[in-house]
Image (cartoon, helix red, strand yellow):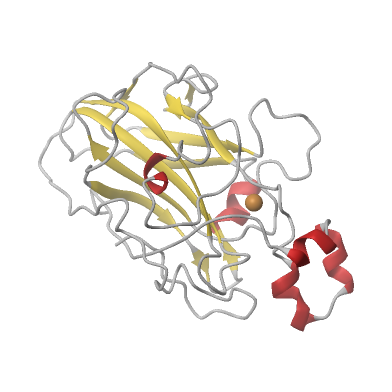
């Protein structure tokens, strides 16, 4: 199994679907509509967004918002050229104070990211951890950084360590699996990278409105981690944010309301 996985390509932003959304406030209304109208209607779920807000290291809960830069508002980024696509926090200002914690993570450890619809998640929310309409991939990247708590996140070089997209055989998406796991996504921090401070950029891309660009919705938060015991034997190929995704990428501009033979996850 590869030490540092590499994968595919692209993206985009928001949940607001305009007039249709305003007319069709609830996803269940969709069941009454024709297949033809379904794609447009799924633009509804206007406020059913999500936030990555907790990290576990080898199963140990690091605490709510500990070491994670998370906004108060759960809305998406839709402009792949914006610096907001790096670690959020621009049009969706961070919850303050931003955590100064840096989470120690042994190289090779299993980490689990936990998503919820909102901060201070209320029980019984049918859109928690994310509305089921928000189908799409889940992706994780790392970038080496001098100080994981520094505010400047521009110019970093990111490499992909995890991705889950579409399972063609049953047309299930990473987001379906995230929901089944109550918002939790587990993946491995590679053993081959060098030790030191990193940002972990963990992302959901919701494709329910992605037939045109902008349309895909990018949800991401960055966790501040300190990798220990890394072998440093590999220097993975990297991408930049913004830059890694384009509005024309096949995984960003896509009509998911059809049987898909495959799906190209953005961000090679
Ligand atoms: Cu949403």
Q: Is residue 99 above or below residue 15?
A: above
Q: Give residue 68's position: percent from left, percent from top.
A: 44, 27
Task: Identify the residue shown where x is 87% and y is 64%.
Answer: 29
Q: Give residue 183's position: percent from left, percent from top.
A: 60, 40
- For the N terminus, give its image quadrant: bottom left
Q: Viewed as shown, does residue 14 lie left or right of 222?
A: right
Q: Give residue 20's position: percent from left, percent from top.
A: 77, 67
Q: Viewed as shown, does residue 133 lie left or right of 194?
A: right
Count of residue discs: 0
Going by the picture, which residue comes out furthest to the left? 233
Q: Is residue 1 above or below residue 148?
A: below
- For the C terminus, give its image quadrant: bottom left
33 or 176: which is nearer to us? 33
181 or 94: which is nearer to us? 94
Task: Identify the residue shown where x is 76% and y is 61%.
Answer: 21
Q: Quadrant of residue 124?
A: top right
Q: Quadrant of residue 26?
A: bottom right
Q: Quadrant of residue 210?
A: bottom right
Task: Identify the residue shown where x is 47% and y is 29%.
Answer: 55
Q: Viewed as shown, does residue 204 lie left or right of 241?
A: right
Q: Give residue 18's position: percent from left, percent from top.
A: 70, 63
């Amino acid at each position: 199994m590869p030490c540092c996985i590499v994968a595919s390509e692209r993206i985009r932003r928001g949940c607001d679907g305009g007039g249709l959304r305003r007319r069709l406030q609830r996803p269940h209304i969709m069941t009454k509509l024709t297949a033809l109208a379904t794609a447009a209607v799924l633009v509804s779920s206007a406020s059913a967004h999500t936030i990555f807000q907790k990290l576990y290291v080898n199963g140990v809960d690091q605490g709510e918002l500990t070491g994670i830069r998370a906004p108060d508002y759960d809305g998406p980024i839709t402009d792949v050229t914006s610096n907001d696509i790096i670690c959020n926090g621009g049009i969706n200002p961070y919850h303050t104070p931003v955590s100064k914690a840096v989470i120690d993570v042994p190289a090779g450890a299993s980490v689990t990211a936990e998503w919820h619809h909102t901060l201070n998640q209320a029980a019984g929310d049918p859109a928690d951890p994310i509305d089921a309409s928000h189908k799409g991939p889940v992706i994780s990247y790392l970038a080496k950084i001098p100080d994981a708590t520094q505010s400047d996140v521009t110019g970093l070089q990111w490499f992909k360590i995890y991705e889950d997209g579409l399972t063609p055989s049953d047309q299930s998406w990473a987001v379906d699996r995230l929901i089944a796991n109550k918002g939790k996504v587990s993946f491995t921090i590679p053993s081959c990278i060098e030790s030191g401070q990193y940002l972990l950029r963990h992302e959901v891309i919701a494709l329910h409105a992605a037939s045109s660009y902008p349309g895909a919705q990018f949800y991401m938060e960055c966790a501040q981690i300190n990798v220990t015991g890394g072998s440093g034997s590999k220097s993975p190929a990297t991408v930049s944010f913004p830059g890694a995704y384009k509005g024309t990428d096949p995984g960003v501009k896509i009509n998911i309301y059809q049987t898909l033979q495959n799906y190209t996850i953005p961000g090679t």
